[in-house]
Image (cartoon, rainbow, N blue to C red):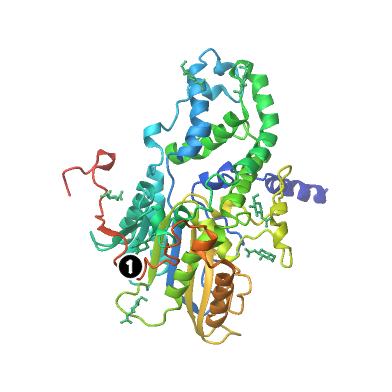
Amino acid sequence: MIRIVALLKLLPAVTALADHSFSPLRHLGGIAPYFEPRDPPTSPSPPQGCSPVRAAYLSRHAAIYANDFDYEEYMQPFIEKLQNRTGVDWSKIPSLDFLAGWTAPVSEAEEELLTRLGKLEATQLAISLSFRYPTFKLPQKVWTSSAERTNKSAQAFVRGLEMDENTIKVVLIDESEKEGANSLTPYKGCPAYSSSAGSEQSAAYRDRFTKPITARLNALAPSFNFTSKDVYGMMELCGYESVIRGSSPFCDLDLFSPDEWLSWEYSADIQYHYNVGYGSNVAGVFGLPWLSATADLMLESSKNSTNQDLYVSFTHRELPPAVLVAMGLFNNSDPGGLPERINQTMPLDRINYQRAWQSSKILPFLGNIAIEKLQCAGSYGFQDGEYYRVLVNNSPQQLPQCNDGPGTSCSRSSFETYVQARQALFQGYSTKCKAKSGNLTETLTIYTDPSIGKAITVGKRAEGEWGLGVGQD
Ligand SMILES: *[C@@H]1O[C@H](CO)[C@@H](O)[C@H](O)[C@H]1NC(C)=O
Ligand SMILES: *[C@@H]1O[C@H](CO)[C@@H](O)[C@H](O)[C@H]1NC(C)=O
Ligand SMILES: *[C@@H]1O[C@H](CO)[C@@H](O)[C@H](O)[C@H]1NC(C)=O
Ligand SMILES: *[C@@H]1O[C@H](CO)[C@@H](O)[C@H](O)[C@H]1NC(C)=O
Ligand SMILES: *[C@@H]1O[C@H](CO)[C@@H](O)[C@H](O)[C@H]1NC(C)=O
Ligand SMILES: *[C@@H]1O[C@H](CO)[C@@H](O)[C@H](O)[C@H]1NC(C)=O
Ligand SMILES: *[C@@H]1O[C@H](CO)[C@@H](O)[C@H](O)[C@H]1NC(C)=O
């Protein structure tokens, strides 16, 4: 009897364990609002005895209203169809009844612009870094590619970091092809890179996973004639509407199940694999210049007035994954696996649940990669000295062949050897990119050459925004 009572008492705990809570917003690849996946679940704190003395961050811009391709290809046609087919009485259709009163959260005019949440996220990142690095001096400059959404992300970041008006400059770096490797958009100067790479493969899996969903929705509302692209666009709207309005009925698990979201995520991972991941022959090549330049900044031992403790750069979604390839992180192949079999790790007819390459964990809005230089003293079992480590979205990552330090870090000499080995794999930007002029800069010098880019200052107050604070200070 007593045993049964004890067992009954356990029941609520058991049900709680069985209830696997699922958020589509953690599985939306490049449309996921910023989150820290804790993968691997190692602590982001520096290892025992170590303190960061310098750090560099490469961040994707924060949340936007919509990427133009996503909007024009998937969401807009669905939204237009919804406006055209006024004959459907949505209010009578379970799981789609919200469509009776739903209005689109984004218009063409807003495409590509940062949302309020995006600005907040970028400001919040600055505050997190100020807590993380309390001894660092404030940077003089923050770098960004020149597009509106990266520019605004950099400015919101600077507003969060600076204590007084106009103390930190935002340096705008041109996004044109002629910059070659010397920009935060090096894929633009790389003709061997195709922005549509991966579309075909991703579409193959998309058609497969949306088929039963399309059939289910068409059984509910035959006259709407849902298509594969409509379904894909509805799932994208979950992400975009969430970062615009704070929530979205398209995220409802009664509409699309957890397994269906995992399928959406996999189709995005296929796209990024071929586009800017290990399935691309040039991703590592245009990812390398940032790794090389940043490694130099971290390894530089003299402290002089142009050195900063913290280097932060904003870019678009293409660059961070390419840098991860250059670093050898999130590689699906097991050690000893054959590099020529890499594409087979992303089959197009089923999900590889064991894959390391998961875009949601890499590329949410504001997704970022950090390299930290640590000074360690009294780390038991390790010599005092300089160590280096990498974090992705605040999770420390173990670099391949660079693991002789405390925690996930490695010593100065291993880090140097590691960077040289990555350079040997991916150097030769102009040749491998098949750059036409054969005259492009091979390296990234924006951090050390003050003549590059256009520096602007940033006031604390975002002028005129939200109609608040206009005309007063
Ligand atoms: C919506 O209707 C307009 C006007 O009839 C038409 O031009 C457009 O192609 C339609 N769009 C869709 C997605 O059905
Ligand atoms: C960046 O933003 C600032 C402030 O809004 C603006 O003055 C500047 O023109 C922008 N630069 C570019 C290249 O868009
Ligand atoms: C449904 O949409 C598809 C794709 O746009 C089109 O080919 C087909 O003719 C449509 N069917 C009906 C009944 O409207
Ligand atoms: C200061 O540091 C910069 C950047 O690393 C370097 O290019 C420059 O030569 C250094 N200047 C001196 C005087 O050491
Ligand atoms: C990915 O891992 C495999 C197996 O360890 C390795 O052979 C290959 O070089 C790695 N790819 C890159 C780009 O680092
Ligand atoms: C993977 O597939 C892409 C696209 O077809 C191709 O360019 C690349 O060479 C393939 N990679 C390997 C290692 O076979
Ligand atoms: C090569 O670079 C130099 C210096 O930037 C420039 O003057 C020249 O026009 C370039 N040549 C070509 C073919 O782009």
The correct choice, above or below, for 151 with respect to 392 in the image is above
Nearest the eye: 234 or 25: 234
Which residue is under mark 1?
139
Please report the residue visible at 60 percent of the width from the left and 26 percent of the height from the top. Answer: 95
Tell me where residue 382 appears, x and y as whole percent.
Answer: 58, 85
| Mark 1 residue's CB less than 8 Å from ligand 4 | no
Tell me where residue 371 appears, x and y as whole percent.
Answer: 49, 69
Q: Is residue 225 left or right of residue 46?
A: right
The correct choice, above or below, for 414 with respect to 336 in the image is below
* Rendering quadrant holding ligand 7: bottom left
Nearest the eye: 191 or 5: 191
The correct choice, above or below, for 4 with respect to 444 in the image is above
Nearest the eye: 457 or 133: 457
The outermost residue toward the bottom is 383
Residue 247 appears in view: no
Residue 444 appears in view: yes
Tell me where residue 392 appears, x and y as whole percent.
Answer: 53, 61
Which kind of residue does numbered mark 1 sit on?
Pro
Which picture quadrant has residue 208?
top right
SS category of the residue bearing label 1: loop
Tell me where residue 319 appears, x and y as whole percent.
Answer: 49, 56
Nearest the eye: 453 or 437: 437
